[in-house]
Image (tube, helix red, strand yellow):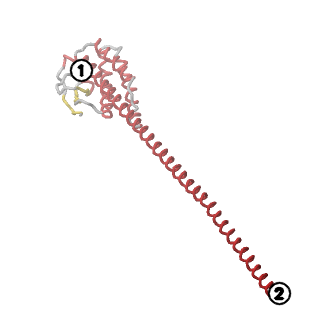
């Protein structure tokens, strides 16, 4: 009996030990499973963070593209304004030539009143001349030319015929220098009279010589020196 009790006690202790170990293993598995479950949300959060970061990068790229597009539109607007300024400038230069030709024709006809009107009109056109579409160097040259030409146009607007023709000689040089910078839409002819004031030039739209310095007295005195295109 004593041996049986001892054996029974040993079996009971062994059972308790096995049960205890089984419980410990079960707890470890539960802890492991809980750890896995707790890690899974962290991985999910990490993926969400990556997606948010990528979306942020895409938004930033879109912002950069929009900025670049805005800059391109701004540059295109500047180019458009430059083209418009250039057209205005060409129009001013064309009007100066037209006013000059009206003055030249009045001197050819020896008409003091018409010459005075043309001189005043030319002075006004020169005063409103827009030089902004030209380079800095050209602007400086044009401003000097315009200032001098305005002075002579002003004198022509209030002088007698002889004095008008004296100022027309210098004015013709100013307009020729201006055309060298602005160009011309139509062919012009630089003509020359060797008789007036030691030799004097003027511009005309025609090859035919009609002398503005002598009028009907020596209407055909002169020659074509140069063709300006």
120 or 78, nearer to the observer: 78
Taking 226 as reference, is 120 above or below it?
Answer: above
Tell me the quadrant of the picture where the C terminus can be found. Answer: top left
121 or 223: nearer the viewer? 121
The answer to whether residue 49 is left or right of residue 187 is right
Which residue is drawn at the image coordinates 71% and 77% (left, top)? 18
Dot 2 falls on a residue whose secondary structure is helix
Q: Secondary structure at mark 1?
A: loop
Mark 1 lies on residue: 212
Name which quarter of the figure residue 33 lies in.
bottom right
What numbered label is drawn on residue 194?
Answer: none
Give whichever of discs 1 and 2 has the lower sequence position: 2
Q: Is residue 162 left or right of residue 150?
A: left
Whether residue 133 is visible: no
Image point 43% across, 37% down: which residue?
74
Residue 86 shows in the view: yes
Q: Position of residue 63 (x, y in %)?
A: 49, 44
Location of the N terminus (image quadrant): bottom right
Mark whose residue sits in front, 1 or 2: 2
- The reply to whether callout 1 and callout 2 are in contact (CB within 8 Å) is no
* Disc 1 from disc 2: Cα separation: 157 Å
Q: Residue furthest bottom?
A: 3
Rendering coords of residue 202 (x, y %)? 26, 26
Name the residue carrying label 2.
Answer: 2
């Amino acid at each position: 009996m004593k041996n049986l009790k001892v054996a029974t006690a040993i079996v009971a202790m062994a059972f308790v030990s096995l049960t205890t170990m089984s419980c410990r293993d079960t707890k470890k598995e539960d802890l492991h499973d809980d750890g896995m479950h707790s890690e899974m949300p962290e991985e999910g959060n990490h993926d969400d963070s990556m997606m948010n970061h990528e979306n942020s990068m895409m938004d930033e790229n879109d912002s950069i593209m929009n900025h670049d597009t805005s800059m391109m539109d701004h540059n295109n607007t500047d180019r458009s304004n430059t083209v418009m300024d250039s057209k205005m400038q060409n129009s001013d230069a064309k009007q100066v030539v037209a006013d000059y030709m009206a003055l030249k024709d009045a001197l050819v006809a020896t008409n003091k009143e018409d010459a005075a009107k043309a001189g005043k009109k030319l002075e006004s056109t020169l005063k409103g001349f827009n030089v902004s579409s030209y380079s800095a160097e050209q602007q400086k040259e044009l401003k000097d030319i315009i200032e001098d030409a305005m002075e002579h146009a002003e004198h022509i607007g209030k002088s007698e015929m002889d004095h008008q023709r004296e100022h027309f000689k210098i004015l013709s040089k100013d307009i020729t220098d201006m055309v060298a910078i602005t160009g011309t839409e139509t062919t012009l002819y630089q003509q020359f009279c060797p008789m007036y004031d030691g030799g004097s030039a003027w511009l005309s739209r025609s090859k035919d010589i009609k002398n503005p310095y002598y009028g009907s007295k020596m209407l055909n005195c002169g020659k074509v020196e140069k063709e300006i295109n």
